[in-house]
Image (cartoon, rainbow, N blue to C red):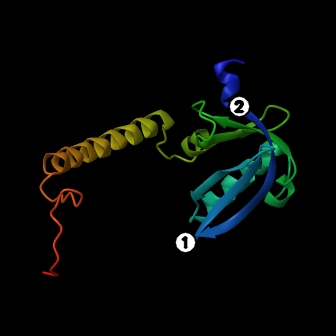
């Protein structure tokens, strides 16, 4: 199996629907991998023209006319990185046609770069871990200050 194969997983579209997530229209596609499911899409599509374009382009990739018609179709989930639960970046139909989020966003005029998004995410994780490390260093410096070893404390008979 090549690295590219690890990023391309065969599945079946379990559901595809336009839904409201916190009051924002969102297209959600669930892919069943035969042992678990993972969602694709899930991006805010408030503008009706953009939403219609997303749905039309996704459906055209599979040669169907509506989201409902996607259910039960085979596909390959495409991931930019080979992690089993990494974000699905695109879907590939049986004939090889692809709907890829970053390509669709660029087509719509949005600045999108999955590599840059991933770099920012890693940088934020590093910053968070550095902050947590400093918190732990401060905590270890004073860990004994508030400790009472009740196994070594003299027993007291009074309740004061």
Q: What is the x, y in percent for residue 81?
A: 57, 31
Q: Which of the pair 91/132 is nearer the observer?
A: 132
What residue is shown at x 62% (from left), y 70% (from top)?
20
- In the image, residue 33 above or below residue 147: above
Residue 134 lies, in percent from the top left, at: 20, 44
* Circles 1 and 2: CB atoms closer than 8 Å: no
Q: Secondary structure at mark 1?
A: loop
The number of discs equals 2
Q: Quadrant of the N terminus?
A: top right
Q: Is residue 26 above or below residue 30?
A: below
The residue depicted at 13 percent of the width and 51 percent of the height is 142
Q: Nearer the viewer, residue 32 or 55?
A: 32
> What residue is at 85 percent from the left and 35 percent from the top?
94
For residue 109, the mark is: none
Mark 2, Cα crowd under 10 Å, few <14 / some 14-19 / many 20+, is many
Instruction: Identify which residue, 121 or 106, lies in the foreground.
Output: 121
Residue 22 to residue 141: above or below? below
State the image quarter where residue 125 is shown: top left
Rendering coords of residue 45 (x, y %): 58, 61
| Residue 22: numbered disc | 1
Tell which residue pokes out farthest to the bottom in this image. 159
Residue placed under numbered mark 2 in the picture? 8
At x 85%, y 33%, the residue is 95
Provide residue 27's location: percent of width, then percent of height.
67, 59
Pointer 1 local density, CA inside 10 Å: few below 14, some 14–19, many at least 20: few
Pick whichever of labels 1 and 2 is earlier in the sequence. 2
For this view, does 154 lie left or right of residue 119?
left
Query: Is 136 displayed left or right of 9 in the figure?
Result: left
- Mark pair 1, 2: CA separation: 31 Å
Determine the secondary structure under disc 2: strand
Q: Which quadrant of the figure contains the C terminus?
A: bottom left
């Amino acid at each position: 199996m090549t690295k590219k194969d690890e990023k391309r997983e065969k599945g079946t579209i379990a559901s595809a629907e336009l839904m409201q997530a916190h009051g924002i229209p969102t297209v959600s596609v669930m892919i069943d991998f035969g042992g678990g499911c993972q969602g694709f899409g899930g991006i805010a599509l408030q503008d009706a023209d953009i939403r219609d374009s997303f749905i039309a382009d996704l459906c055209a990739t599979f040669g169907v006319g509506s989201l409902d018609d996607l259910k039960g179709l085979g596909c390959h989930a495409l991931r930019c990185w080979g992690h089993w639960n990494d974000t699905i970046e695109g879907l590939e139909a049986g004939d090889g046609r692809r709907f890829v989020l970053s390509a669709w966003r660029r087509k719509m005029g949005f600045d999108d770069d999955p590599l840059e998004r991933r770099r920012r995410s890693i940088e934020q994780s590093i910053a968070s871990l550095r902050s947590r490390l400093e918190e732990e260093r401060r905590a270890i410096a004073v860990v004994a200050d508030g400790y009472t070893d009740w196994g070594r404390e003299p027993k007291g008979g009074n309740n004061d």
